[in-house]
Amino acid sequence: LLFLLKKLYKKKNDLNILDFGGGIGIGYFYLTQNLNKKINYTIVEIPSFIRNIKSHKEPKIKYHSKIILKKYDLINCCSVFQYIGDWKKEIKKLTKTKTKYIYFADMFVGNITSYVSLQNYYKNKIPHWFLNYNEFDNELKKNNYKLVYKSKMNTTRLSFKLQVPMKNFI
């Protein structure tokens, strides 16, 4: 994400970023430490999450429980679509902002049939989607977007590159 922003917006002094499923704002803190730009940062999260972090919110981040239809420089979607049952509806909402670039990272997408499993997540079982690549790509095309780059996700845990652990799925 950092490389992309530096390349696309090297002459722009301020950036408007929507982080869809952005949690507490780790993306914001990373970008403010690594970009010499003013960053207007908006996070869309589920209402219960926003309520639970109310006393820990970063005052420079705007938090919303739904997508605000305005144009951003970039929409960041990192590790979020696997938790959305009606992900096509959310793609449609994101594309209505007419933002030129939507960045997807940490996606569970492949040449598979789309399916849902349950993930053991901190003593809870939550639905986790695995999406068919062509279905995802077609949804972007249907909403006048095209995929310009894709790569396999490598993750690093304790300085080791590994495959994502999958034993927490039922």
Image (cartoon, grey):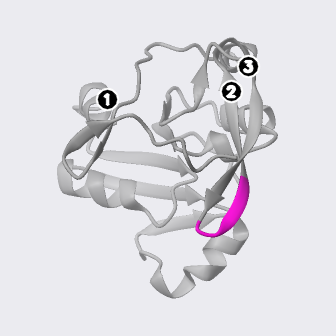
Residue positioned 68% across, 47% down in the render: 83
Q: Which residues are magenta?
A: 122-126
Quarter residue 3 falls in: top left
Residue under pointer 3? 139
Q: Which residue is mark 1?
A: 4
- C-alpha gap between disc 2 and disc 3: 12 Å
In the rendered image, which quarter is residue 29 located in? bottom left
Q: Quadrant of residue 130?
A: top right
Residue at 71% x, 33% y: name it. 91
Looking at the rendered structure, the kind of residue marked 1 is Leu
Queried whether the magenta region covers residue 80, the answer comes back as no
> Looking at the image, is mark 1 or mark 2 nearer the viewer?
2
Horizontal side of 155 relative to 118 (left or right) equals left
Marks 3 and 1, the one that precedes in the sequence:
1
| Marks 1/2: CA–CA distance | 24 Å
Residue linked to disc 2: 131
Image position of 116 (left or right of 56): right
